[in-house]
Image: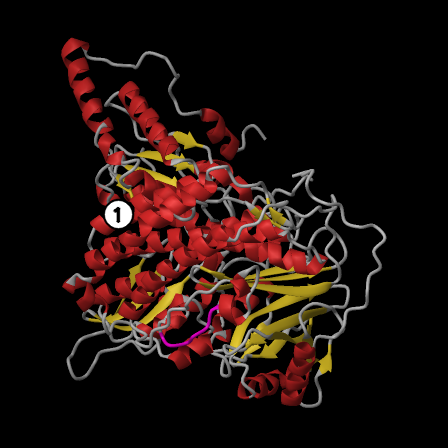
């Protein structure tokens, strides 16, 4: 791993401010035009993300699909216990090109419910079942909301940050 | 904790002493019959096709033409447990699968053997730490005869493990008692362990 | 039993024929389900009226485990997702980490990555072809496929040390430089294997029984494929011309010239044909990458502890079965806050209930084999 041929990174190189990529700017404009008002751009770096109200999620999803984003990569959630919410992440893209973005929606941790978008993108069916299985988020109007990866009678939802498993002999990593 | 039935089971061992003399009763004639039976059994072990993850690919490679396990008699891999002698547990066993695995094992007729292939089946493998859904070793579910470490073990290693099992069969003798299922003491399992088919 | 009844509450007696619907379980232990997958079939005689896959028999909680280990430690678990595209999974995860931390990968490592990934694609398709033959009742393709696959395994073993779960492509580059006779071995394999693909086509594809069992079976329409998010050869056989290597290229793919095989039939025969053509294209890519490989370091210099900055990153890679995507969210510490693996097989399998309707039980095996799913990738 320590390779003598590898040059060490220059320690004092000034970090230039990144110039905005015109393709990314055009993509952001297209998404915002599709979503309309009510979608705020999320500040975290990396995947371009827009936050919408949980109540408007199906409408936002339909607008995106009609604007040409017919590819739903996945639906998942991120647990934020410090803010008391689950942040649902819907990553969408298009089969025609390689751009992708994320649609975010917040639901409160003690009553996590949101409408299902499986009527818009059929693939959301199984992804939402998995999110329900792992986090306990209930998707209203889902055709068949059952656990998909764990046993039907599994206690708890494992990907929550406060999930403690006393039944299944979990060994914590010592390092 | 020493009287914890799970620990008692684990301390029991396989029931035979490596290098020790086999227990054979009955004189010269029955000893020859015994040798014939164990020779026949060890050279025609039919495995059950059971693979859950990556080790299954190395098991398939062991059955393919370069490593060819059929030279040793494991030619006929049966899909139904009713016709299988040995179950090669190749891959990770989760709690969801463990109960179904016990059912499969119970459906196999005696005499039957279990080979735990790979690190996952031996002890949980790379999923030992932090995984909530993996059984840490298939010996918590089935009585294992041979453990084979590796992630995944090479096909040659699998064949060596099967050869060790053949040695074990010859050494144990034909009148080997069936091994009881270990107590599967994890709460929340759809199958009641009290209803396991345990030989008396 | 509740789940069985709940999957289709409309089970009843067909008034026309007098046949009663019944439910049959296929799996989780079954020779043709490619792993531990349980299919609950609702049958009327031999015809499938409905199908429900039940997953999770090898769910190991990899996403939760990832939250407790460093990003470099997680690489060994990505091998074990879809173990037949091990290098591509490693590459996808490394791309996510490299994007998050701004790591620049040396040129030689990029070439090695492409060669390893395409050899994995060939090896995965060889296994798929062999197992497809075996599932449909022909044992010879299994032996041919594995015999040729062993050659690729030998190449991997010399350089990476392992045959199946290699853990070779890591964030920053690759673990170690290739062996001296790597180029010779790879060229010898490519020259050996090219006529073998024609032999494969004659052996299995030319067989009339195989053609009858795959033509018109399990037709996946492009609208359903798009809506479900099917990718990879499954979608390309339905006319969806989507390949991450062309649509959103990574590594040195922009510099390589290769075709993307696309068919419009959408049936099992089309899926079969797409994968056979892909093997040819992969050989061409391997040759190009090998010819252009420069000298140089194979791994970027990395700090001892990689702290994932706050933010969310997504990397998308074309695995052998479709698009695998890694979503990484960091919170400034060495351990990720959340990581999600978008599995291609998960979305591809979602098509099965719809496309198996109306076919016979034996056709399900043909469809599942040509969908080419690997269950640990679905269950993670």
Name the residue rendered at 54%, 42% in the picture: B126
Count all numbered tags in the image, as a single digit.
1
Give the main secondary structure, helix, strand or loop, of the magenta stretch. loop
Q: Residue at x 46, y 30 (%)?
A: B9
Front position in the image: B52 or B29: B52
Near-viewer residue (B55 or C179)? C179
Whether residue C28 is visible here, answered yes or no, is: no
Q: Secondary structure at mark 1?
A: helix
Task: State the image coordinates of residue B181 (x, y, percent, origin top left).
Answer: 38, 36
Query: Which residue is denoted by mark 1 in the rendering?
Result: C144
Mark 1, chain letter?
Answer: C
Q: Characterize the local packing of mark 1: few (<14), some (14-19) or many (20 or more) Cα atoms within 10 angstroms.
A: many
Would you say B74 lies left or right of C249 here?
A: left
Residue at the spot x=30%, y=59% of the render?
C26
Quarter where residue A155 is shown: bottom right
Front residue of A37/B175: it is: A37
Is the residue C94 above or below the residue B149 in the image? below
Residue C48 counted in the magenta span: no
- Rendered image coloring scheme: secondary structure
Region in magenta: C238-243
Q: Is residue A166 left or right of residue A147?
A: right
């Amino acid at each position: 791993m320590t390779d003598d041929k590898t040059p060490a990174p220059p320690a004092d190189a000034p970090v230039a401010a990144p110039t905005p990529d015109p393709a990314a700017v055009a993509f952001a404009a297209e998404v915002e035009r599709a979503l309309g008002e009510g979608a705020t751009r999320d500040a975290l770096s990396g995947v371009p993300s827009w936050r919408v109200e949980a109540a408007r999620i199906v409408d936002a999803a339909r607008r995106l699909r009609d604007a040409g984003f017919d590819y739903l990569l996945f639906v998942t959630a991120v647990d934020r216990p410090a803010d008391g919410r689950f942040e649902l992440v819907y990553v969408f893209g298009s089969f025609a090109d390689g751009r992708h973005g994320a649609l975010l929606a917040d639901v409160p941790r003690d009553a996590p419910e949101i409408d299902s978008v499986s009527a818009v993108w059929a693939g959301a069916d199984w992804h939402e079942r998995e999110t329900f299985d792992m986090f306990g988020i209930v998707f209203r109007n889902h055709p068949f909301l059952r656990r998909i990866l764990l046993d039907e009678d599994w206690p708890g939802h494992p990907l929550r940050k406060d999930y403690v498993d006393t039944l299944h002999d979990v060994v914590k990593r010592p390092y | 904790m020493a009287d914890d039935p799970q620990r008692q089971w684990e301390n029991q061992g396989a029931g035979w002493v490596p290098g020790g003399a086999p227990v054979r009763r009955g004189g010269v004639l029955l000893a020859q019959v015994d040798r014939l039976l164990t020779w026949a059994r060890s050279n025609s072990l039919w495995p059950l096709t059971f693979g859950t993850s990556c080790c299954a690919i190395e098991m398939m490679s062991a059955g393919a033409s370069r490593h060819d396990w059929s030279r040793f008699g494991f030619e006929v891999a049966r899909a139904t447990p009713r016709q299988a002698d040995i179950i090669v547990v190749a891959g990770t066993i989760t709690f969801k699968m463990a109960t179904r695995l016990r059912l499969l094992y119970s459906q196999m007729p005696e005499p039957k053997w279990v080979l735990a292939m790979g690190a996952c089946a031996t002890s949980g493998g790379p999923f030992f730490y932090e995984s909530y859904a993996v059984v840490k070793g298939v010996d918590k579910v089935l009585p294992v005869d041979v453990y084979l470490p590796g992630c995944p073990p090479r096909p040659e290693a699998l064949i060596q493990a099967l050869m060790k099992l053949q040695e074990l069969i010859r050494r144990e003798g034909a009148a080997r008692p069936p091994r009881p299922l270990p107590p599967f003491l994890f709460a929340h399992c759809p199958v009641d362990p009290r209803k396991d088919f345990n030989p008396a | 039993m509740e789940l069985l009844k709940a999957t289709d509450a409309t089970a009843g007696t067909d008034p026309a024929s007098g046949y009663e619907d019944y439910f049959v379980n296929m799996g989780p232990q079954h020779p043709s389900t490619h792993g531990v997958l349980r299919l609950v079939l609702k049958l009327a005689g031999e015809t499938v009226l409905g199908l429900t896959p039940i997953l999770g028999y090898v769910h190991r909680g990899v996403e939760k485990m990832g939250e407790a280990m460093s990003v470099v430690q997680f690489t060994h678990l990505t091998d074990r997702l879809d173990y037949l595209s091990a290098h591509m999974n490693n590459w996808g995860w490394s791309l996510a980490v490299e994007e998050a931390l701004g790591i620049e990968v040396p040129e030689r490592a990029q070439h090695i990555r492409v060669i390893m990934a395409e050899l994995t694609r060939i090896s995965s398709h060889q296994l798929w072809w062999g197992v497809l033959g075996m599932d449909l009742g022909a044992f010879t393709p299994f032996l041919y496929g594995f015999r040729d696959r062993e050659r690729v395994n030998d190449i991997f073993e010399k350089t990476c040390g392992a045959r199946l779960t290699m853990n070779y492509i890591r964030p920053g580059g690759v673990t170690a430089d290739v062996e001296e006779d790597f180029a010779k071995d790879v060229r010898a394999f490519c020259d050996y294997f090219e006529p073998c693909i024609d032999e494969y086509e004659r052996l299995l594809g030319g067989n009339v029984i195989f053609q009858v069992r795959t033509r018109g079976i399990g037709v996946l329409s492009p609208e359903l494929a798009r809506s479900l998010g099917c990718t990879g050869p499954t979608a390309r056989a339905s006319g969806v011309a989507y390949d991450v290597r062309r649509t959103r290229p990574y590594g040195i793919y922009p510099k390589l010239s290769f075709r993307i095989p696309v068919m419009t039939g959408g049936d099992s025969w089309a899926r079969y044909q797409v994968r056979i053509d892909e093997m040819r294209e992969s050989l061409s890519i391997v040759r190009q990458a090998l010819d252009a490989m420069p000298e140089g370091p194979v791994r970027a210099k990395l700090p001892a502890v990689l702290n994932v900055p706050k933010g969310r990153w997504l990397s998308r890679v074309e695995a052998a079965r479709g698009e695998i995507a890694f979503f990484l969210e960091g919170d400034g510490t060495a351990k990720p806050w959340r990581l999600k693996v978008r599995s291609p097989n998960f979305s591809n399998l979602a098509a099965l209930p719809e496309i198996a309707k109306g076919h016979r039980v034996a056709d399900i095996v043909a469809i599942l084999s040509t969908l080419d799913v690997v269950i640990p990738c679905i269950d993670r």
